[in-house]
Image (cartoon, rainbow, N blue to C red):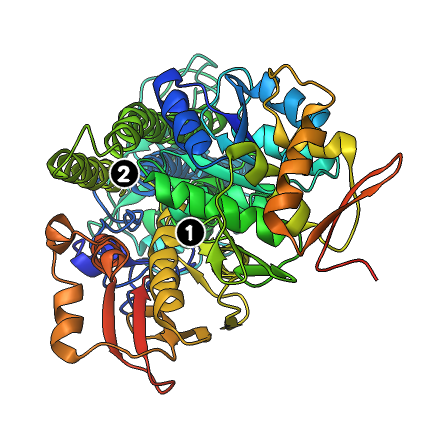
Amino acid sequence: MKILLVEDDAPLAAEIAKALRAENFALDHAVNGEDGQHLGETETYDAVVLDLGLPKRDGIAVLQAWRAEGRTVPVLILTARDGWSDKVAGFKAGADDFLVKPFRVEELVIRLRALVRRATAHGANRVVCGPLTYDSGLGTFERDGLPLKLTGLEWRVLSCLILRKDGVVPRGQLIERVYDGDADVDSNSVEVIITRLRRKIAPARIEGVRGHGYRLMPGEAA
Amino acid sequence: MRAPSPEAHREKPERPAPPEHRPPQPVVPKTETPKSDSPKPGRPPGPLHPGSLQRRLLAAALVLITAALVVAGVAIGLVLHRFVRGQLDSRLDSQLVALGAGLERGPGGALRLSRDFDGPPFDRDRAGWYWQVRRGGQVLRSGSLDGRDLAAQASPEGPRGSDQPRPADGTGPWGESLILRVLVLPAEGPGPPTVLVASAPAAALRGPLREAGGALALILGILGVSLVAGTLAQVRLGLRPLERLRRDLAAVRAGERDRVPGKQPAEIRPLVEEVNALLDQNAANLERARTHVANLAHGLKTPLATLTLALSDRTRDPDGVLANLVASMDRQVRHHLRRARAGALGGATRTRTPLAEPVADLRTTFARLYSEKGLVLDVSLPAGAAVACDGQDLDEMLGNLIDNACQWCRGYVRISAAASEAGLVVAVEDDGPGLAPEAAAEAVRPGRRLDETVPGNGFGLSITQELAELYGGGLHLDRSGLGGLRAALTLPV
């Protein structure tokens, strides 16, 4: 899962980045509204954490621009203003959730996972695919009721696949959603991760669709 | 004139009533809420108020009109007097000339008239209409003199010569006041001149004058009254824009419009421009104050957020003491920011916020915030419901109540509103567990939020109560028919 963080305050951004990476999220960071809007328009993200008081371009304006362009990426607004008027204005501009500063890491993470899950049309907290279960509240995977130990990259790939289990996830999109914007991506590394994952999640399978992408399947091939 | 009683101040100025009118009823404009403790909008003083423009203009007009009428009356009276006197004089003069022409020398040089000159009005006895001709010892008299002598002291000769009749002074034989004319005809030969005197009673002058004077006074009186009435109408018409301006300002104050309309008479336009500039400045100041508060919030809260995140690392804050300190700082900041915002309340103008839109926005917001819960937010508001509150404060009060209801409900929240004597009552009800009466009292106890460690548990209720009371409203908590809490927010309209 990849998050776009648009936050101008460097110490706060550093803390958020550290916290989110610790929870296996991939992260891009923009320090002003203009850059943030541009990243949101050119890259693929599972969710955006958007501060409202931004230099160059206000957070509300950025959000409105995205929504006017038809971008449906879930947006969580960070703001210092805790009045309902500000929240109403945020939701009217197209926000999906709201977090008032100061907030706790756990809250931010839970809300982000819930946003991503809802954006992929999963109503319940737990997403099941055969023996695999993803708990979006805790951000954990289980196989046959037992916790599954995954590395950060494995977690990103598997959560991306399980949330889109009814379709094929294009390879390019998978790479975009897994690696940080500034990461040096080796074209084979996704293949390596997939291979390791296949061992961990059996009997569920990751099916390669030639020339297209990957698909998570609940059980053995017929 | 009636002394300006307190009631006179309350008189509605547009009522076209003279001051001595039925006692005026105090009329309270609809936009007023009697319970509001803000100062009443100043009503213009009645026409008799000492500081009244109407009174000044009317008094000036009255003085001018009276002076003009007095001058006109005196001048017309003098002209009339001269005219009537001239008529009388020429009547007497023609009698004198006729007498002079009718004089004959009778037998023995006796003085004699060629015919009877006692035609009317000289035929009435002692009526004041007399004539007399005297030459030396010989005297001829009108019958009306009844044989008495008519004494006359002729005024000095006029510039036209001695052969013209002249006015004279004198009284009648019975002491009556007379108007006299004298003609002195010099003798043809040696001997005394012939002195002809004719008289009319003073009443002949006074009578027509009195008659004409009465008519004149009546005409001048009618003229005066109509002038006063015209002035009154003019003053009221002229001052009408002021009354319109007052209503416009009242509308601004009641929040029905933002500014005073610029379409005004040229004399008032500068005033209106000043008032509008003041209103703009006021709004700008309020906006600036709010921006400052928002900047302060941002400036304080971002480092607080960083601290919170940094302290979530257990190695930095093993016993959670620092996190608690940060939480306490956050509560203090929030409390004082809210205070600062509330302090910006009570500006010169009141706003009028329709209820429908903010409630619809909040409904959308909460539907989104609690989308996991799948709750039903039922809104039923009377058409056109509005309250005299700032939009942001309304959002704050309702937001807190709805948030509380959404947290506790099992799936159904109802928002309704109804008018009451105190204003508009907005009720937010839920089907949750509700609050025991003691707990309800505790929830709205002022200052509670500062001790509150778990935000969100009735945390917003005391804030809502505080805000509502600032507006002169209130918050009442009891049990809803739905089973849960019913929070009734009373707001001024």
- The residue lying toward the viewer, choosing from A24 and B253, is A24
Please tell me whether residue A2 is drawn above or below residue B407 in the rendered image.
above
Q: Position of residue B278 (x, y in %)?
A: 37, 27
Q: Residue at x 30, y 76 (%)?
A: B485
Give the quadrant of residue B446.
bottom left
Q: Residue at x 61, y 26 (%)?
A: A179
Gap between marks 2 and 1 measured at Cα: 60 Å
Q: Residue at x 43, y 40 (%)?
A: B242
Residue annotated with mark 2: B341
Query: What amino acid type should be assigned to the residue bearing mark 2?
Result: Arg
- The residue lying toward the viewer, choosing from A138 and B410, is A138
Mark 2 lies on a secondary structure that is helix
Q: Position of residue B103 (x, y in %)?
A: 51, 36
Give the quadrant of residue B296.
top left
Residue B47 is tagged as: none
Look at the image and tell me in which quarter the N terminus of chain A lies: top right
Left or right, B113 with reference to A199: left
Q: Position of residue A27 (x, y in %)?
A: 54, 27
Residue B225 is tagged as: 1
